[in-house]
Amino acid sequence: MTASSQMPTFAMPGVTRRGLFAGAAVLAAASTLSGRANAAPAALPLVGPPRFYPFKIGSFDALSISDGALVIEPLFPSVGLNADAKDFEALASDHYLDARRDLFHMNHLLLNTGKNLVLVDPGGTSALGPKMGALPANLRLAGVDPKDIDTVIITHAHPDHILAVTGPDGALAFPNAQYYISDAEWAFWSQEGPDLSGLHFPEDFKAYTIATAKAVFAAIHDRVHLVKGEAEIVPGVHAVPTPGHTPGHLSLIVSDGYETLFHTTDVVHHSVAAMAHPEWQPIFDQDAPLAVATRKKLLDRLATDRVLTMVYHFPFPGLGHVARRGEAYAWEPQNWVW
Ligand SMILES: [Zn+2]
């Protein structure tokens, strides 16, 4: 049986198919009379990336601003190298996932604290895929001049987060910013031949990842500040070491007044798989056992604290809550508010 022959037919109450077509004919005749029958309607913008989503954290103005998305092909086993295929199939069926393909969104956090204009990660570029590299255009749409950004936090040195530190002309994209990165991340990528044996990337992409980190570090070396442990970066923004995805991976806590946002950055990647199976090891984690331990600890903390959470790669704008579901978790997206 084919999919189409299984498809149920829906009848609208009091309207037969015949009646519908008759109605359409009447409408067509009416529009002919008004001279619009043959005018092609304007094409709808059926394809378009997300732009930006404003929200508040206490008195801070915040934007979740999109750099587009990474295309993940295939989704399985990319999100769970150690996952049982049958477990993934069950999860995919329950959550309408396509095992062949999904998008990892790129949700950047931009903060105006009143004292600082802070961007979390400079972004990727279209070199990483046709849906990437939207951040510069989206900053313009949001009315943000890159020259006004005084603080850029680098959560970790993977290309999708840092490649756009310089523009096409080779100049710094955020020329007046001070850059913050963990001392562990800086030390790891700065050494001769960083060991990426735990990472399940093709060898040429590993080499590209190392070269990108070294080039970005060279571009910012005279304006970089190394963050040690849990530390305040600017007032209201704290770094929290969450190693595993990379050795010096940082998450962030943003707080003002009574309100707090926890930004996991890349502790989790897929809004269904990482929540239902925090023990699954995605190909993107460099030290998989450490990443799993960090992920389990952090999800437990977020579900216990019931804190507003932002996640880089979850569906735009990547804001919501981590809810406990037995031994695992679920992502509960926050409603759009305006
Ligand atoms: Zn990432």
Image (spheres, rainbow, N blue to C red):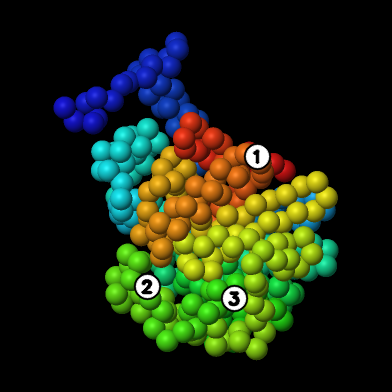
Find disc 1 in the rendering and name its residue: 306
Q: CA distance from mark 3 to mark 2?
A: 18 Å
Local packing at callout 1 (Cα closer than 10 Å; few below 14, some 14-19, many 20+) is some
Q: Residue at x 39, y 59 (%)?
A: 288
Depicted 335 relative to depicted 64: above or below: above
Depicted 147 relative to depicted 255: above or below: below
- CB-based contact (under 8 Å), mark 1 and mark 2: no
Front residue of 151 and 260: 260
- CB-based contact (under 8 Å), mark 3 and mark 1: no
Find disc 2 in the rendering and name its residue: 196
Q: Quadrant of residue 127?
A: bottom left
Q: Residue at x 43, y 40 (%)?
A: 276
Residue 224 seen by the camera: yes
Quadrant assignment for the C terminus: top right
Q: Is mark 2 within 8 Å of ligand 1?
A: no
* Lower sequence index among marks 1 and 2: 2
- What x and y, as percent, mark residue 211? 42, 82
* Lower sequence index among marks 3 and 1: 3
Q: Is mark 3 within 8 Å of ligand 1?
A: no
Q: Name the residue type under label 1.
A: Arg
Local packing at callout 2 (Cα closer than 10 Å; few below 14, some 14-19, many 20+) is some
Residue 33 seen by the camera: no
Local packing at callout 3 (Cα closer than 10 Å; few below 14, some 14-19, many 20+) is some
- What x and y, as percent, mark residue 178? 70, 79
Q: CA distance from mark 3 to mark 1?
A: 30 Å
Q: CA distance from mark 1 to mark 2?
A: 35 Å
Q: Name the residue type under label 3.
A: Asp
Q: Residue at x 36, y 59 (%)?
A: 283
Depicted 128 relative to depicted 324: above or below: below
Find disc 3 in the rendering and name its residue: 183
